[in-house]
Amino acid sequence: MAEDRWTPPEVMLAVDLVILTLRESLLHVLLVRRGIDPYAGAWALPGGFLQHVEEDITAAARRELAEETAMEAETLHLEHLGVYGAPHRDPRGRVVSVAFLAIAPRLPEPTAGTDAAGAQWQPVDRVLSGGLDLAFDHLRIVEDGVERARAKLEYSSLATAFCGPKFTITELQRVYEAVWGIRLDPRNFYRKVQRTSGFIVAAGPDRKGATGRPARLFKAGPQQVLNPPMVRPVSPSNSRGSEQ
Amino acid sequence: MAEDRWTPPEVMLAVDLVILTLRESLLHVLLVRRGIDPYAGAWALPGGFLQHVEEDITAAARRELAEETAMEAETLHLEHLGVYGAPHRDPRGRVVSVAFLAIAPRLPEPTAGTDAAGAQWQPVDRVLSGGLDLAFDHLRIVEDGVERARAKLEYSSLATAFCGPKFTITELQRVYEAVWGIRLDPRNFYRKVQRTSGFIVAAGPDRKGATGRPARLFKAGPQQVLNPPMVRPVSPSNSRGSEQ
DNA sequence: CAAATAGTGTCTATTAGACACTATCCA
DNA sequence: TGGATAGTGTCTAATAGACACTATTTG
């Protein structure tokens, strides 16, 4: 295949992160304001180039995640999302970006004095409706990340990643409602979640709220694939498939 | 973020294809025998480096697919599978491979005299059980591709991509049985598939077999996302999640 | 006719979804 | 006590899965 003296072209490799969390029962994504060209002043996903030629790609993503969220990245959910490498997506040259989806429980505000200075949580709705201008193809990456999260709530235990280590069933319901953008019946949700074996398991004593009956606490169970799945109420139209 | 004189490291970019098809009711994957080092003599996925620095990644995958299958790649299903870029996966340097999953209807034997000379369909079972030795991390890539196909049969119309443009319901059932490795009740399958709106639509007159009642022909319908999904009979144990 | 494959009917246990109710806290 | 949130019971329509049957071809 390779001719004798031909050598393959080289590209710059970057990682970008779609970090999602819930704030005030709304889905938010972490964005940073770009200080330098290209796209100076626009919003962008946290991310950056590989630091050196031996750095592992997932390690680079974990490094960025830790810098941006100031949390131990080991405890956060992080998964590969896709590759974005159209030839002219970055005017500096051929840059191929490996995108990751990260899910975080509610975090403190982005802390100044770190790489995350200038980072802000933005409501996903506002981003998806075009209310912000995003650098490069980052709008598309956010769209893909959100769609991935929506899909994975159905058949995986991803929702628990939005919660702290212990959570109530109502809190878990809020995750589904925020990510799917719908309301669910709390009574049916309660039983459905408990009957899906391995999804959540009891964890310690009840948590008292300001008012009302104290709620039982749970933690994520051993199953990462839910069977039966949580079903998202049908929307009649068909979505764009995942083909290219 | 970037220091003034620092420039990011560069990597070589490759594409690799997991091309699946059905032969004799068994799932097969297309492999080529490597003629040159590294891993000379081992089996590998079809693929190769980007040809030039401006080549689009998906275009490179389509180019490889056309070379290997000798079919118009536009008619085949092709989707992004994942990125495999561990620092020392390739002894020639830092090679990051973007893997694609392709699904093909039954094809003629790989034709000599093209790039596909030396390419052979191998039963997936044999590959997954370690019966062949695969170069690089290609075994892992095949595993991921097969698992993706298994999962997507449930909630997408991917199964139709294994069939020709027209097919019978029994042929479609064979796809599910081969990919999932189980038997299905033809009577329930028949109704299930027809009641999943937009999955398949009638296409032309019946096809006569050597014996038995002629079967109605169908083609793929407009829905790419199935609702309700085809449910894969539960296996009690949990699979490895998709986390990293 | 028999053999083979295609397609339909029907019963039952399970489930999703609607909704009324009871339980346990605070003030 | 009332207000608020947590958790349970129960009915019904729809569905998955088991399996008996009818339909249409070739030889």
Image: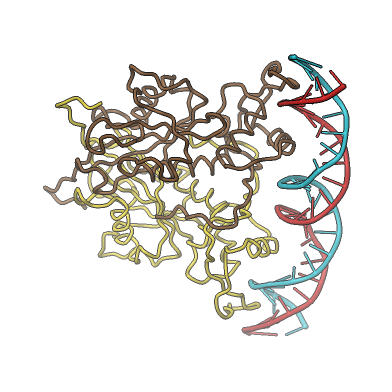
Chain colours: A yellow, B brown, C red, D cyan
Viewer-side residue, A60 vs A182: A60
Q: Please tell me which residue lies in front, B39 or A208.
A: B39
What's the residue at 36%, 52% (across, down)?
A31
Q: Nearer the viewer, residue B2 or B30?
A: B30
Q: Position of residue B4 (x, y in %)?
A: 13, 49
Marks counted in the figure total 0
Left or right of C26 in this view: A242: left
Q: Residue D4 location, x and y as percent?
A: 66, 73
In the image, residue B44 lies at what x, y percent?
34, 36
Horizontally, residue A43 falls left or right of residue B25, namely: left
- Viewer-proximal residue, B37 or B216? B37
Using the image, determine if residue B173 lies above or below residue A207.
above
The location of residue A176, given as percent across then percent down, is 57, 57
Which residue lies most toward the left here? Answer: B5
Specify the quadrant of the image occupied by residue A64: bottom left
Quadrant for the C terminus of chain B, please.
bottom left
B162 up-or-down from A12: above or below: above
Examine the rendered structure and indicate whether residue C16 appears above or below residue A140: below
